Image: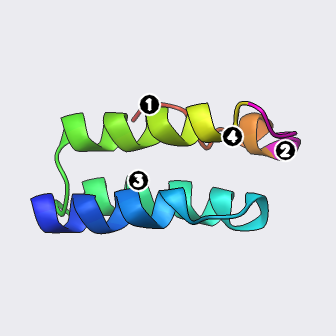
Amino acid sequence: MRQHYDALKAKLQDTSKAESGKLVEEIKQAYEDGKIDKAEQQDLLQAAKGMLGSMELGNIKDAGFFDKR
């Protein structure tokens, strides 16, 4: 699990605004597939929120990308 978490964390650091929604979905899918655990999912989603917090989120918030599952 840790290896997949590290890969997603690195990807998050290099993502652009345009790719951010897709990456959040990838994080959620990795959790659903058992590739990362709940704590790792929450950490990645919090990091995504922090990174995107200064950007214009537009429809990302409205689409529920950051909703907890």
| Stretch of the chain drawn in magenta | 54-59
Amino acid at dot 4: Leu
**Dividing the picture into quarters, in which one does residue 6 lie?**
bottom left
Q: How crowded is mark 3: few (under 14 residues within 10 Å), some or many (20 or more)?
A: many
Q: Nearer the viewer, residue 5 or 21?
A: 5
Q: Which of marks 1 and 4 is nearer the N terminus?
A: 4
Q: Earlier in the sequence, mark 3 or mark 4?
A: 3
Amino acid at dot 3: Lys
Q: Mark 2 points at which residue?
A: 59
Write the residue at 46% across / 32% down.
Answer: 46
Report whether 53 appears left or right of 65: right
Q: Earlier in the sequence, mark 3 or mark 1?
A: 3
Quarter holding the C terminus is top left
State whether residue 27 is above or below residue 42. Answer: below
Q: How crowded is mark 4: few (under 14 residues within 10 Å), some or many (20 or more)?
A: some
Q: How crowded is mark 2: few (under 14 residues within 10 Å), some or many (20 or more)?
A: few
State whether residue 39 is above or below residue 16. Answer: above
Residue 1 shows in the view: no
Label 1 to label 4, Cα distance in Å?
17 Å
Q: Which of marks 2 and 3 is nearer the N terminus?
A: 3
Which secondary structure, mark 2?
A: helix
Label 3 to label 4, Cα distance in Å?
17 Å
Q: Name the residue under label 4.
A: 52
Residue 49 position, x and y percent, is 59, 34
Dominant secondary structure of the magenta stretch? Answer: loop
Q: Mark 1 points at which residue?
A: 68
Report whether 19 appears left or right of 58: left
Q: Earlier in the sequence, mark 2 or mark 4?
A: 4
Q: Mark 3 points at which residue?
A: 28
Residue 8 position, x and y percent, is 37, 63
